[in-house]
Amino acid sequence: LLQVTAGKTAAPVECRFRTSGNKILDVEITVTSLFFFGENRFTVFARDITQRKRSEILIHEHLKFLQQILDTIPTPVFYKNFNNRYEGCNAAFEALIGKSRDQIIGHTLGQLVDKRVAEKHERQDRELFKSSGATAYQARITGADSIKRDVIIYKATYAKPDESHAGLVGVVHDITEQSSIAARLRHRVELQKLITKISKDFINLGLSEIDHGITEALEAIARFSQSDRAYIYLLHENGEELVNSHIWHVNGLPSGALGERIKMADYPWAAKQLASLQPVSIRSLADMPSAAERERKFIKAQGIKNLLFVPMVYNQRPIGFLGIDLISEEKDWPEELVSTFRIVGDVFVNAVIRQQAERELEQNREYLNNLFQFIQMGILLVDNETRTIIDANPFALSMLGMPRDQVIGSTCHLFICPHGRGECPALDMNQHIDRAECTLLTADGGTMPVLKSVTSIMLNGRPVLLESFVDITQIKRMEEKLQRAIEEADAASKAKSNFLANMSHEIR
């Protein structure tokens, strides 16, 4: 009344009345000024708003209840109007943004976070308002706690009663853990593919291809593990040194020297780890134990931030190690990578052992070939089944006096064993021939006395006879001379005896 008397417009006043029946009514009172018959009068209107107030209370309580429900949902939820201004959110969204609800409501995302980041999401909102309905997209966001999260944002429009756009509601679903699991699974699948490829590649590698194959595999390992270098050190035959046999490195980094040697006695801690057949993973030089001080200084001198090496094992003994390192940063090596390196190390071990064995075999083959070619003894190889000569050394050919092409493929008894099929002492009669005197048939139709030995061997999976023989012509001639000398001496001795006997008779 005072406001109206003062010429002001008074706002409606809400108050409560108690009726004679003790019923409480909510009443809205409006007072207006009225000039009536030359006098100022007041008109008072009282309107029962009890039902409206009850409806407002119910709505308020319902909204409060809905807000409580939203706040108990751990997933961030928000809703905004057609102008992209927030009209509400839950506690999880407040925590994500790092601002209170009062600071969020009425503002756009661009007023709350970096505008470049906000533009990407608001562009999605504008497109959604054009088409209505719902959408979902994946994004990587950084919350108020500075933690990067992988999320899927679900958004849907909602309309007013007249079906015009009112706004949209959004849910931010954190899939960081699922993404991490999926990434690990993809990583594991790629690891399996890497192992399979390396194993498959090494199956058919020839001796001359093994070194190149190992280097290529080291590159694949380094790139997959995002390492700067990958290398192999093998234990020297003296058992006291490790020798760098293979290495790969990214461009611009020091590669180290192939053939570089490390004395194990200089680095006892690393030698102990190698002997125990356990992998060594060093995330940071600061994490290395005090017992590894020498190793830490050595690694630091090379500028290495962290490294991983796994022993290469053969017959339960270390023959070297496979290693990778990083010069650019520190990082943790996942356990599945360590396990994979063990498998790859086994592949390398098999390749290295096979390479060493083939080299030794080649050296032995070369040695035996030289022996076969230059030994001063005739050697023939005879096929057990066909009885044909399949190889002959130069000395045997010279003894036979025939070129190689006339000897190879011929039946053996035409030259050295004058017995036909069914009468071979070694094959048919199971006789052991060791330094037995035989006759060699020469190209000019003559014969040569030889001392022959026969041994059964396996050659390329089939049984053959190795027949070796030496010329004993001179020995036989000496034996003949000796025999003649003996005979002459016997004759002289007999003549002497006869002479002495005759002389004795005459004297008597």
Image (tube, grey):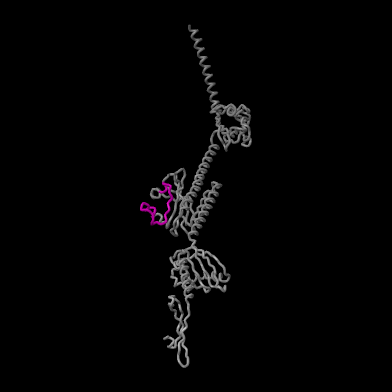
How many marks the image carries: the answer is 0
> Where residue 468 appears, x then y in whole percent?
55, 32
Residue at 54 percent of width and 39 percent of height: 369
Q: Is residue 257 visible?
A: no
The N terminus is located in which quarter? Answer: bottom left
Q: Is residue 15 visible?
A: yes
* Of 233 and 361, the residue lying toward us: 233
* Of 184 and 30, the residue lying toward us: 30
Q: Is residue 280 magenta?
A: yes
Residue extending furthest toward the top? 508
* Of 198 and 150, the residue lying toward us: 150
Q: For the magenta stretch, what is the residue range?
A: 273-296
Residue extending furthest toward the bottom? 38
- Residue 476 location, quadrant: top right
Q: Is residue 49 magenta?
A: no
* Of 60 and 89, the residue lying toward us: 60
Q: Is residue 123 above or below residue 419?
A: below
> Where residue 146 appears, x then y in whole percent?
44, 65
Residue at 57 percent of width and 27 percent of height: 430
Q: Is residue 370 above or below residue 324?
A: above
> Where residue 481 appears, x then y in whole percent?
54, 23
Q: Is residue 373 above or below residue 301?
A: above
Residue at 50 percent of width and 13 percent of height: 497
Residue at 48 percent of width and 7 percent of height: 507
Q: Is residue 193 above or below residue 83?
A: above
Residue extending furthest toward the left? 290
> Where residue 274 appears, x then y in whole percent?
42, 48
